[in-house]
Amino acid sequence: MHPQHSLDPKATSIAASIYSDKFTEETFHVEVESTNLHQLVERYGPFEIVKVDIEGAEMLLVDDIISNHKDIGKLLMETHERFMENTSESSKYRSKLQDLNNFIRTKKLEVCWLTDWI
């Protein structure tokens, strides 16, 4: 959870992350059930639009996005490089996002697949 969560749970809920080192202060956490993109595509796809804003965990979704690309019409991904720069995962994060950007260029998806779109 965001370090200021207890002061304003609603406003800080938008900044939660699965990466605790995204924040410089000690925070608490909540366990939640999750699924992967492949399972969502199998159950509900194909999708006209996939919006990804998962506060620093985008790199965990890159391989699933690439392997399910035929079932994604438009991709809007908010990347969080600026928040991940000083974390233990920063080099892995940059590498995975580079893999995705290379895939987008190779497949000529620049018009409909946007990263860091905000």
Image (cartoon, rainbow, N blue to C red):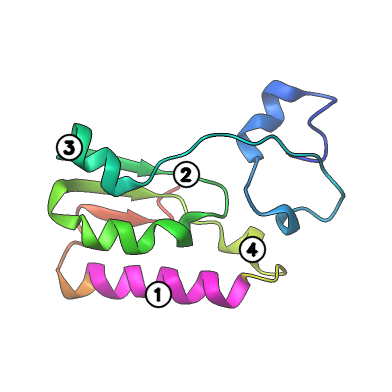
Residues at circles 2 and 3 in contact by the CB criterion of under 8 Å: no
Which residue range is magenta in the image? 90-104
Lower position in the chain sequence, tag 2 or tag 3: 3
Residue occupied by mark 2? 53
Instruction: Say the numbered circle drawn on residue 45.
Output: 3
Instruction: Say the numbered circle drawn on residue 84.
Output: 4
Discs 2/3, front:
3
Residues at circles 4 and 1 in contact by the CB criterion of under 8 Å: no
Residue drawn at (58%, 77%), measured in percent from left and top?
91
Decide: is 33 above or below 95. Answer: above
Q: Image quarter for residue 30?
A: top right
Magenta-drawn stretch, dominant element (helix, strand or loop):
helix
Residue drawn at (86%, 51%), measured in percent from left and top?
25
Residue drawn at (15%, 69%), measured in percent from left and top?
107
Q: Which of these two is toward me, 36 or 6? A: 36
Amino acid of disc 4: Met
